[in-house]
Amino acid sequence: MSTNLDLNQVLENQANKEVTINTATGQLDAAMTEFLSVDVSASSQSLTNTQYRRNALFKVTGAATSGRTVTVPALKRLSAFQADPANSDPISIVRGATSYVLSPGSTALIYTDGTADGLIAVSSLSSGGVKPYDVGTFVSGLPASDEKLLRFNYPRSVDLPASFAGSIVTAQTAATAQTDFTVTVNGIGIGTIRFAASGTVATFVGIGAQNLVSGDVLMIQAPTVQDATLADIAFTIAGAQV
């Protein structure tokens, strides 16, 4: 017998069985039809077991700061998550070390398998004309001095959030010293992708929100002075088509 939804159970020789049955039916109905608004305007949120079990749709609102997350319990569950179109920044649905990024206006079906990191995005769709548009590249070994690592011509209009929220840049071999990569749009600097000394995960410095249109060119360029060890770098820049 499955107990994933933690429904009330009728006991042997129990009196007033109809009360327990009616309660369990209501719990099942809620798990299939109810929705919960999750406000992340002040901080990231973690759903309780009961919240996760008793709702089918979770609408995440108030994402006006980069890095906001909604953590779900390690339970077996299929549910839908929607990022409010009014959000200005993406949000991440998190289970352990696994996460899924939702851009403003997008919705995803999420399945958790009950394990520590068991989160799977079953499918995703967008509303309000917004859908993810991510761009990536990989640099094998040490980048050369002033090497152009990415030069991408956008064929359609795309928004890149401030601080490149939702983007990920990592290196397999850590930097020896602080290393800055220049980011430009149409040849004009918009900020820096920075690896700290001994770091393998980059941060995004001084990058404001970008509203790109068809024909705009995003470029990432290596520094003039090559770091001694920073190598095998993966760049993934998250955006949303508009």
Image (spheres, helix red, strand yellow):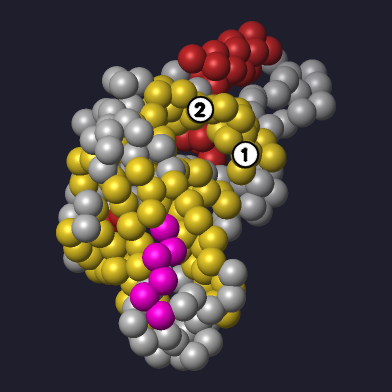
Q: In percent of the image, x 41 and y 35: which residue is there?
A: 132
Q: Label 1's element?
A: strand
- Residue 124 - label: 2
Magenta residues, as a range? Answer: 145-150
Q: Quadrant of residue 182?
A: bottom left
Q: Quadrant of residue 202?
A: bottom left
Residue 221: x %, y % from top left = 35, 68
Can residue 84 be seen? no
Can residue 20 be seen? yes
Instruction: Give the residue type that dot 1 points to.
Output: Ile
Instruction: Give the residue type that dot 2 points to.
Output: Ser
Residue 155: x %, y % from top left = 35, 33
Q: Nearer the viewer, residue 90 or 180?
A: 180
Residue linked to disc 1: 120
Residue 133 in the figure: left or right of residue 129: right
Q: Residues within 10 Å of mark 1 (few under 14, many from 20)?
A: some
Looking at the rendered structure, the number of numbered marks drawn on it comes to 2
Residue 202 in the figure: left or right of residue 104: right
Whole-angstrom CA distance, mark 2 to mark 1, is 11 Å
